[in-house]
Amino acid sequence: MRNRIGWRLTRNGVLAVALVALAGVAGCSGSGSKTPHKGQAAELLRWDVDDKAAMRKLPNDVVSALYALNTDATGIAYGSDGRLRVMTAYLLRFDADRTMHATDISGGKSVGWQNYGLVAEPGGTFLTIRGADVLRWRPDGTSQVVAAFAAADRRRGTAVPASAPIGTVHASYTLRLAGVRPDGSLVLVDSDVVWSLKDGRLTRLLQLTASGDKENSNTLMEGGAVNRSGTIWTASGPLHAQTLAGLRTVAPDGTVNRPALPARVEGVSEKLASLQVGWLTDDGADGVYAHVYSPSNEYVLHLRPGSARAVAKNTHSPSVDRCTMPHHPVDAMSMPCTIPREITYHAGHLVAAGGADYVLTLPLA
């Protein structure tokens, strides 16, 4: 079936764009079931930014929203309304009728707009971080600063206080929101510190030991996950090269552990410790799902203390950009194309988006 992208523009403080009827699983022709079952993966949405003829028919803002999803996704979460959101220069909302609605939140800036992490709040709002500011985004696309670090950057490895008002603490590198604990405290990950934030006050949960090797210094991954019990999962290692060997958890009582994992897992070619961690999301219980990869394979693993299980695998190099997903469900352990970078768990299934021109769903039950 040929992809169809419709559009409309409205104004409500910021530009809003609706991308209507992107081709999805239910809208494609072909034989066989279009509903994925446990152990399968299927497209929720598909588009093609390399289809120049189709792109020329769309307004620049629509094209920009699609490109942003392909290249600049920095957060993913389900809202209290049960709808998926993805954070880019646009705040994207995916509806049950397979439409994508995009609100431009870049403020017209080509740089400095990046928002990192996305945490849903009960009332339909979302939290993210931009620079040193923690922002709350409303459904209409307007925002407010709810907390802010001191503006000046802190050198990685510099000591930080055990607890202090957020406005007196300097952050280093890029801050990310990792999630929220049952007590309502936000979890923020700096390049070398895991913080909790509640009532305007930061509490240091973990700080990595400083290293004199600037190129390969021990650094936390960009983000992490918080599971239902409030345990935080993240990983440390050289900059942009954190592996499962550096996996760490922070329990609600403050205990920091390196969770034991098996050396090898069925369906995974490599030793687990060698796999690089790209994204973590909670599993709705006591573990996490991890998007991990090697130079030749990528996987989604279900991790719990002492155990690991592969739920998806792409046997083609993640560096291969162009690949056409079939219009029917496929075996999740034999994915023909890359798994989109960002994953989130919701109501018994995973959704993957960002870094590809499709959104995938993977039922887990």
Image (cartoon, rainbow, N blue to C red):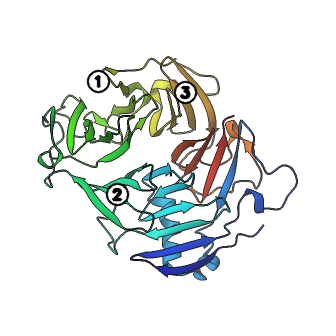
Mark 2 vs 1, N-terminal side: 2
Residue name at image x 34 percent, y 60 percent: 114
Quadrant containing the N terminus in the rendered view: bottom right
Q: CA distance from mark 2 to mark 1?
A: 27 Å
- Secondary structure at numbered mark 1: loop
Q: Which mark is residue 254?
A: 1
Q: CA distance from mark 1 to mark 3?
A: 32 Å
Q: Position of residue 247 (x, y in %)?
A: 39, 27
Q: Which mark is residue 270?
A: 3
Q: Which mark is residue 136?
A: 2
Mark 2 vs 3, N-terminal side: 2
Q: Amino acid at mark 3?
A: Glu
Q: Residues within 10 Å of mark 1 (few under 14, many from 20)?
A: few
Where is residue 107, by image quadrant?
Answer: bottom left
Residue name at image x 43 percent, y 61 percent: 88
The reply to whether discs 2 and 1 touch (Cβ–Cβ < 8 Å) is no
The reply to whether discs 1 and 3 touch (Cβ–Cβ < 8 Å) is no
**In this view of the protein, can residue 107 be seen by the observer?**
yes
Q: Is residue 41 left or right of residue 135?
A: right
Q: As displayed, is residue 58 above or below residue 299?
A: below
Q: Residues within 10 Å of mark 2 (few under 14, many from 20)?
A: many
Q: Position of residue 125 (x, y in %)?
A: 42, 56
Q: Residues within 10 Å of mark 3 (few under 14, many from 20)?
A: some
Q: CA distance from mark 2 to mark 3?
A: 41 Å
Q: Position of residue 2 (x, y in %)?
A: 75, 70
Q: Amino acid at mark 1?
A: Gly
- Secondary structure at numbered mark 2: strand
Quadrant containing the C terminus in the rendered view: top right
Q: Is label 2 or label 1 in front?
A: 2
